[in-house]
Image (spheres, grey):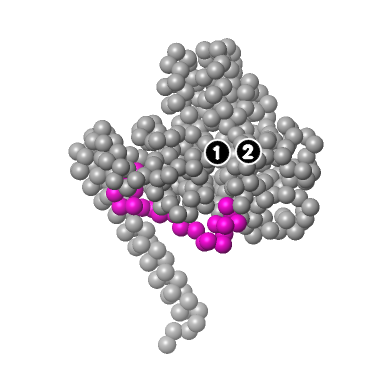
Amino acid sequence: MLRYNEGYKVSQILYKAFCKYYNSVQALQIIIDRWDVKYMTNNDTNAMKKKILELKEQRDAVIVAHNYQVDDVQEIADLVGDSYALSKFCAQNQHKVIVFCGVHFMAESAKILSPEKTVLLPEIDAGCPMADMVTAETIREYKKKYPEAKVVCYINSSAEVKAESDVCCTSSNAINIVKSIPDKDIIFVPDKNLGAFVAKEVPEKNIILWPGFCPTHHRITKEEVLKVKGLHPDALLLVHPECRPEVVELADYAGSTKQIIDFANNNSAQKMVIGTEVGVLHKLRKDNPEKTFYLLSQGLTCPNMKKTTLESVLISLRDMKYQIELNEEIRIKARTCLDRMLQMGG
């Protein structure tokens, strides 16, 4: 007869073996699915796109993609945009199925706003490290510490965090959202860099920053920016406010991905350095073939955003996976948070 400690150790070994086996089976299934798609389409990109469009029609689906997605995925999407534009679109569209080419919190937001629809995330493990830097439990602790403060959560957060927050925001509307709140004290989660950007623009508020950040944007340093500005002295520098404050301070313009794209499209400058995820360059170069765009840093690649491929979109539509499901109580609370953003943010 095994003693308790020995039995516990055995159970842990068996559990780890099961997890390893389960993950291996999952990985094998993904490989099989992708090879199946390549065989079905003769590994032809145009054939994949054609099949995706056929399945989209059959499923009464709409495909949305974030600006950071790979070029091929952006090309087959019905709408490409930043988090705010995609949130509004998903709340208003009439299709039964939403295929969200992005990361988990984005697909969750679509499900929060459209519970009657089937929301598919082609790559179920496409997460967001910044969103994982805050939890509902830690939000509750902060609310006890600052009972008079309102909680503004960046859309880069889980449904559970949104359920604990007063209002959501994106990088497009964060300044307007915070200005619209009558209260002085604001807990801003989870991005300290975006929060600092908002605090500078809305100095009348006391913004309590959360210590979270986007690993992709946060890795850019002031020294790196100065070096690039020296290499391209005649180029404008456009950055995302998820960058460090000292990087934003050196920029000619700071804004969301949509705002950066709009600025570049409407500005007469012929050369621009782009300080956000590399995926934005696809639309910038497509819309402005006569202009030259430089990426601020070769490290500006979000690995989670690059997980979605044409193959995974095709498999998602074919097999109706991976479906986003939420606890209804949490969804209703999170819906209030998102609805307030849509009402306040225009």
Type of the residue with mark 1: Tyr
31 vs 163, nearest the viewer? 163
Check if mark 2's residue and mark 1's residue have beta carbons within 8 Å.
Answer: yes
Camera sees residue 245: yes
Q: Which residue is mark 2?
A: 345
| Image point (54%, 31%), residue name | 257
Q: Is residue 332 magenta?
A: yes
Labels 2 and 1: the sequence-earlier one: 1
Residue 296, image x and y in percent?
Answer: 54, 25
* Labels 2, 1: front one: 2
Gap in angstroms between the C-alphas marked 2 and 1: 9 Å
Q: In the image, 134: left or right of 285? A: right
Q: Position of residue 157 (x, y in %)?
A: 57, 48
Magenta region = 311-335
Q: 161 left or right of 299?
A: right
Q: Secondary structure at mark 1?
A: helix
Viewed as shown, does residue 212 lie left or right of 99? right
Residue 84's disc number: 1
Q: Residues within 10 Å of mark 2 (few under 14, many from 20)?
A: some
Magenta span: chief secondary structure:
helix
